[in-house]
Image (spheres, helix red, strand yellow):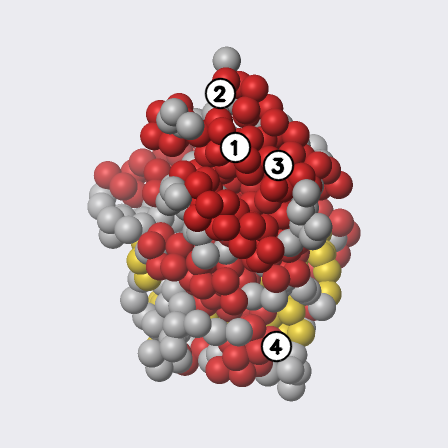
Amino acid sequence: MVVKTRFAPSPTGYLHVGGARTALFSWLYAKHCGGQFVLRIEDTDRERSTQPAIDAIIESMQWLNLAWDEGPYYQTKRFDRYREVIDKLLAEGKAYKCYCSKERLEKMREEQMAHGLKPRYDGHCRDSHEEHSPDEPYVVRFKNPTEGTVAFDDMVKGHIEFSNSELDDFIIQRSDGTPTYNFCVVVDDADMGITHVIRGDDHVNNTPRQINLYKALGAPVPVFCHVAMILGDDGTKLSKRHGAVSVMQYREDGYLPQALVNYLVRLGWSHGDQEIFSVPEMIEYFSLDAISKSASSFNTKKLDWLNAHYMKTLPIEEVAAELAWHLERLQADLKAGPDPKLVVKAYAERTHTLKEMAAKALCYYQDFASYDPAGVKKWIKEGSVDVLKAALEILTAAPAWEAQPLDEALSDLAKRLEIGMGKVGQPLRLALTGTATSPGIGDTLVLCGRERSLQRIAAAIAYFSA
């Protein structure tokens, strides 16, 4: 049997952390088993589904490098197939048309609740022989078994059993002719040969209805794996108030996809005490029976730690490519400044996110508007302008614009002037970047480039002399 998993988001919003983890687990299990991973967009809710949400889901999956083998499939493009299956179920007596009015259903539910009963359809139209006009509105309901139980062995939660008497005849086609979620999911999984369904545990209650529908269609029932929810740092359900929960928000906040993927895989799954995993290691070690039954807590500090690790250890080209995305969002002209790889090399140990790195590096690609007042107050003293003039003279004559010889020349200047290196380097940093913080002064000069460096030092001399 070829293992086939799927990720099937509804495009009613952006891809959030919980969905991304589900996608990752499904992708990893397929890869671990040498199987296939399917992306399916469940867009039957036409009122709430949007194209921007679809675009964001696909963009997020691509950013996380979760490549799908099939798809993306769209449920709205499969309506003919759903109608075909509904007609077959009607013809076989496994579904029926329900003409109950909204008013009747509301009254029925009120009476059930008044008697302390669970609200559920009473089967009024199940075996009805009433005559109805062709234009009378109706829904189609699945004829759920009334006796026995439906049971399954969940890969995370263990054996789960429901009594069929607790399940009602759920709607599989609305009065406007559109199919419903629980129905489409089953038809899609059957048609696409899905063998394992990995999803959030908020779907557990849908599972018995779907299993009965698989059986009615004569389709194999997949293996189910319901993953516990993700909690916020405070122990409550993860939500927007906990900060960035959309995948692309994490990109905007400066996290690397490798860091987020590594963090997500540890939310509810483990392999001994190992914390840092390469993707090949994740694929090799991943198994469904190692998924925790307990809810996981999102720990932003741990994600920060992982991000810092990957900023320092990934191939510099990968980090630089992501940094370039951030710089372009700040309207930086990458052709007007240093190769982003040089920025990563200089700043990886000095920053925690790529957003922070891009903000600090922006001065190398475009002019800054002012000098940091606190830095000016601390470092621009009597004699600072003369130091800048002496440095400008040395740098103008520098035979090679490389960090080490530039550092050595400025160190010699400090010794000749009999002052500390800080009284040379800090005024230069202010001149070059507008702030008193930057990498080593030689690296800063290289990032600025010869022409821009000399121009900025001259401009600072003029400004601080005024």
Residue type indicated by callout 2: Phe
Q: Which residue is mark 4?
A: 31
Q: Residues within 10 Å of mark 1 (few under 14, many from 20)?
A: many
Mark closest to the chain's N terminus, 4 or 3: 4
Residues 12 and 184: in front is 12
Specify the quadrant of the image occupied by residue 333. Answer: top right
The spot of residue 315 in percent (x, y) is 61, 66
Mark closest to the chain's N terminus, 3 or 2: 3
Residues 264 and 391: in front is 391
Cα distance, mark 4 to mark 3? 61 Å
Residues 423 and 19: in front is 423
Instruction: Determine whether label 4 and label 1 are within 8 Å by CB.
Output: no
The spot of residue 4 in percent (x, y) is 63, 74
Residue type indicated by callout 4: Lys
Q: Which residue is mark 1?
A: 388
Instruction: Determine whether label 2 and label 1 are within 8 Å by CB.
Output: yes
Mark closest to the chain's N terminus, 2 or 1: 1
Is 465 situated above or below 206? above
Q: Nearer the viewer, mark 3 or mark 2?
A: 3
The spot of residue 162 in percent (x, y) is 36, 68
Mark closest to the chain's N terminus, 1 or 3: 1
In what element is the residue under mark 3?
helix
The spot of residue 455 in percent (x, y) is 65, 30
Instruction: Determine whether label 2 and label 4 are within 8 Å by CB.
Output: no
Is 436 situated above or below 459? below
Quadrant in which the N terminus appears: bottom right
**Residue at the extreme bottom:** 1
Instruction: Determine whether label 4 and label 3 are within 8 Å by CB.
Output: no
Q: Which residue is mark 3?
A: 393
**Horizontally, is 130 left or right of 397 in the view?**
left
In what element is the residue under mark 2?
helix
Q: Nearer the viewer, mark 2 or mark 1?
A: 1
